[in-house]
């Protein structure tokens, strides 16, 4: 009995395009142009009697390997290549700023809420507890993303969304700090600011340690090219 899975041309093309899109040397227009050539090749091969799967494999080979195509388009798209290489770093910086500013805003807001309900003696501990909880959120998002693949992290990491988030949270945080400086005791306010400073330092160190670990693991497995 033939247990061979039925070939789906749409899925094959999508996988092929995904490999091209991941390369920083190519634009969306480049990928669409190559897809058009691929479809033309498939059509011509089918006309001479080849199956759909055979036509796809031969056409893909004729178009060229992803690495070779990337090198060719890289000569033309030098500006695009540079921008695409910079974008991940910009997103990383914006994600960090958005997380820190959102965490600070939420912590300030909840501390003010605690002050309003008469928990003045516990504001320092409330602040510490909130910062610990918020520090776990990024790791929870990562776990959810890679376990279920249904968390909309791509939308959250879009540059316009991140820029707007940073601008709004920074503005609101400034207002909460003004209010806190006027309505909370100086000693408590100083402790709260110190808590957030320590939180920022520890969280930054965790990111540095995690980044270094991933970097050297990837280098060991030859998954990245290290610039000498």
Image: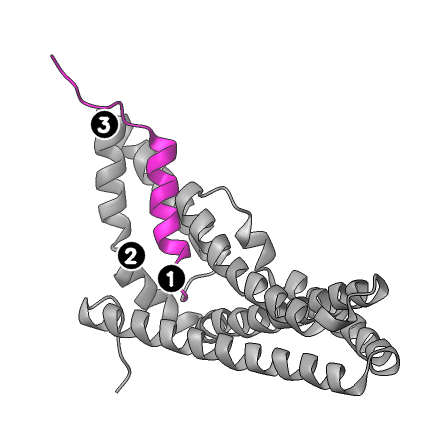
| Lower sequence index among marks 2 and 1 | 1
| Lower sequence index among marks 3 and 1 | 1
Q: Quadrant of residue 195?
A: bottom right
Q: Which-is-in-front pick, marks 3 and 1?
A: 1
Q: Which residue is drawn at 20% across and 68% down?
A: 222
Q: From the viewer's perspective, is 62 left or right of 1?
A: right
> How did the renderer colour the structure?
one colour
Q: Is mark 1 on a helix, strand or loop?
A: loop
Tag 2 near tag 1, CB within 8 Å? yes
Q: In which quarter of the image is residue 75?
A: bottom left
For the residues marked 2 and 1, what is the alpha-carbon distance in whole angstroms? 8 Å
Q: Pointer 2: what residue?
A: 66
Q: Residue at x 78, y 64 (%)?
A: 114
Name the foreground residue: 181 vs 200: 181
Q: Identify the magenta region.
A: 1-24
Name the foreground residue: 184 vs 202: 184
Crowding at dot 2, Cα within 10 Å, few <14 / some 14-19 / many 20+, comes out as some
Q: Pointer 1: what residue?
A: 23
| Lower sequence index among marks 3 and 2 | 3
Tag 3 near tag 1, CB within 8 Å? no
Q: Which-is-in-front pick, marks 2 and 1?
A: 1
Q: Position of residue 129 (x, y in %)?
A: 60, 65
| Quadrant of the image containing the C terminus | bottom left
Name the foreground residue: 193 vs 48: 193
Tag 3 near tag 2, CB within 8 Å? no
Q: Which-is-in-front pick, marks 3 and 2?
A: 2
Is 36 rendered above or below residue 3? below
Is 226 rendered above or below residue 27? below
Q: Residue 48 carries which label?
A: 3
Q: Is mark 2 on a helix, strand or loop?
A: helix
Q: Can residue 163 be seen in this view?
A: no
User: Magenta stretch: residue 47 in it?
Assistant: no
């Amino acid at each position: 009995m033939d247990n061979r899975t039925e070939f789906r041309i749409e899925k094959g093309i999508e996988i092929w395009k995904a490999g091209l899109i991941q390369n920083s040397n190519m634009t969306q227009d480049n990928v669409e142009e190559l897809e058009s050539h691929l479809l033309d090749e498939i059509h011509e091969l089918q006309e001479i009697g080849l199956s759909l799967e055979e036509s796809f494999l031969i056409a893909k080979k004729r178009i060229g390997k992803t690495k070779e195509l990337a090198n060719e388009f890289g000569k033309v798209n030098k500006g695009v290549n540079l921008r695409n290489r910079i974008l991940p770093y910009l997103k990383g910086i914006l994600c960090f700023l958005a997380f820190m500013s959102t965490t600070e805003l939420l912590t300030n807001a909840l501390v003010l809420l605690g002050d309003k309900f008469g928990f003045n003696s516990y504001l320092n501990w409330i602040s510490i507890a909130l910062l610990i909880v918020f520090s776990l959120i990024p790791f929870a998002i990562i776990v959810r993303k890679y376990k279920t693949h249904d968390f909309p992290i791509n939308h959250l990491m879009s540059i316009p969304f991140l820029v707007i988030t940073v601008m709004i949270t920074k503005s609101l945080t400034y207002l909460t700090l003004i209010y806190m400086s006027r309505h909370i005791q100086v000693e408590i306010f100083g402790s709260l600011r110190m808590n957030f400073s320590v939180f920022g330092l520890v969280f930054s160190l965790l990111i540095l340690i995690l980044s270094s670990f991933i970097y050297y693991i990837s280098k060991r497995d030859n998954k990245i090219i290290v610039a000498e």
